[in-house]
Image (cartoon, rainbow, N blue to C red):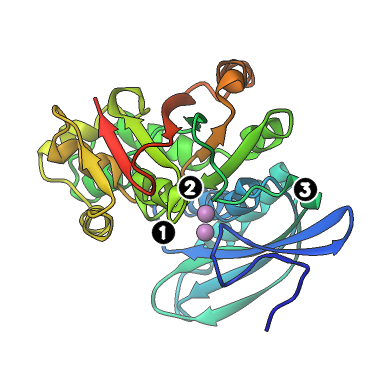
């Protein structure tokens, strides 16, 4: 079934579903729930909500309403559940989102997240596709959360590395999303399970644009490369790389270890934004001045190699 008011749906999956309900209003719908990524239940609740809200921000929207989704063992410690929900609730309050309901299921494995309803003006909706040759690419958070989480599980991570990724995963993408409105942004997505390159591929897939990513310009958590060298690599990084190997080429100097970082699956990652080159520096300055201090220009959209990504030093 099709509908002329459907802006983003199942045919070409985007970060969220989008439906135009009037000339000046589009509804944005998304759902995301995850297994614990940290031991602290309160922090896990916050991160799960930050992660789920990210898809609305990636569409250029404002999240408004949410419903809890909870899987929790029936004989589990109820105080843990209360802390998860408190973390989620506090994060929703910070984002200006109203919790309006929810549903829980008895499950031996804990999972938590939310469904979200957001809004945007229809012409403000930013899809994954639409990047134009000449555009610059900006990434708003460092990558490497999957690798560092793997190191934490193996008891190999230094405390600073854990603190860094937790702070990052717990940071809303609200500020970059709101700031995008003032600039000529052509496409946006959030970096999550497919890794930076996996989501970058989605931006140009089937289009007449290619992409160059400069590894040295990509913000990376500083311990990540060392942990990759120690073999602390999540299975998802291999799967992501295998899935996109026909689309990504590497220049001299780019190692297999670097590629594992670029394909590392992220939880609650940053926004990947394609915008007009002449505004890129100004937008970056604005991001930095508004506290998005690790944002960086990481590459550009090209007319060469359509549908392909070239990784350079
Ligand atoms: Co997304
Ligand atoms: Co998502």
Quadrant where the image shows the N terminus: bottom right
Measuring from the top left, give residue 59's x and y in whole percent: 64, 50
| Labels 3, 2: front one | 3
Q: At numbered mark 1, what does the secondary structure look like: helix, strand or loop? A: loop
Q: Is residue 253 visible?
A: yes
Left or right of 21 on screen, residue 205: left
Q: Are marks 3 and 2 in contact (CB under 8 Å)?
A: no
> Residue at 26% of width from left, 46% of height from top?
248
Residue linked to disc 1 = 36
Tell me which numbered mark, 1 or 2, is placed earlier along the sequence. Answer: 1
Residue linked to disc 2 = 268
Q: Nearer the viewer, residue 234 or 112?
A: 234
Q: Is mark 2 within 8 Å of ligand 2?
A: no
Total number of numbered discs in the rendering: 3
Residue linked to disc 3 = 123
Up-down relation of residue 152 to residue 15 (above or below): above
Left or right of 93 on screen, residue 156: left
Left or right of 134 on screen, residue 86: right
Up-down relation of residue 225 to residue 7 (above or below): above
How packed mark 2 is, by other alpha carbons closer than 10 Å (few <14, some 14-19, many 20 or more), is many
Tell me which numbered mark, 1 or 3, is placed earlier along the sequence. Answer: 1
């Amino acid at each position: 079934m099709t509908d002329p008011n459907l802006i983003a749906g199942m045919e070409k999956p985007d970060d969220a579903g989008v439906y135009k309900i009037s000339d000046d209003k589009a509804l944005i719908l998304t759902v995301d729930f995850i297994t614990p990524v940290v031991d602290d239940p309160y922090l896990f609740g916050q991160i799960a909500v930050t992660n789920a809200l990210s898809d609305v921000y990636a569409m250029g929207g404002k999240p408004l309403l949410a419903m809890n989704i909870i899987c929790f063992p029936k004989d589990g410690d109820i105080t843990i559940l209360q802390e998860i929900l408190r973390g989620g609730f506090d994060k929703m309050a910070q984002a200006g989102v109203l919790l309006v309901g929810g549903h829980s299921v008895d499950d031996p494995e804990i999972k938590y997240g939310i469904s979200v309803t957001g809004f945007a003006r229809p012409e403000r909706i930013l899809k994954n596709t639409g990047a134009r040759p000449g555009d610059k690419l900006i990434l708003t958070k460092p990558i490497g959360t999957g690798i560092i989480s793997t190191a934490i599980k193996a008891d190999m991570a230094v405390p600073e590395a854990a603190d860094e990724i937790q702070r990052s995963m717990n940071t809303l993408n609200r500020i970059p999303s709101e700031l995008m409105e003032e600039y000529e942004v052509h496409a946006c997505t959030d970096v999550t399970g497919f890794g930076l390159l996996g989501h970058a591929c989605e931006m140009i897939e089937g289009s007449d644009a290619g992409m160059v990513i400069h590894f040295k310009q990509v913000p990376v958590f500083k311990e990540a490369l060392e942990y990759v060298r120690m073999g602390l690599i999540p299975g998802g990084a291999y799967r992501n790389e295998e899935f996109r190997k026909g689309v990504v080429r590497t220049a001299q100097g780019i190692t297999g270890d670097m590629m594992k970082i670029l394909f590392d699956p992220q939880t609650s990652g940053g926004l990947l934004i394609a915008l007009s080159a002449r505004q890129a520096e100004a937008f970056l300055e604005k991001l930095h001045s508004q506290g998005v201090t690790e944002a960086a220009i990481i590459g550009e959209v090209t007319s060469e190699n359509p549908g392909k990504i070239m990784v350079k030093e």
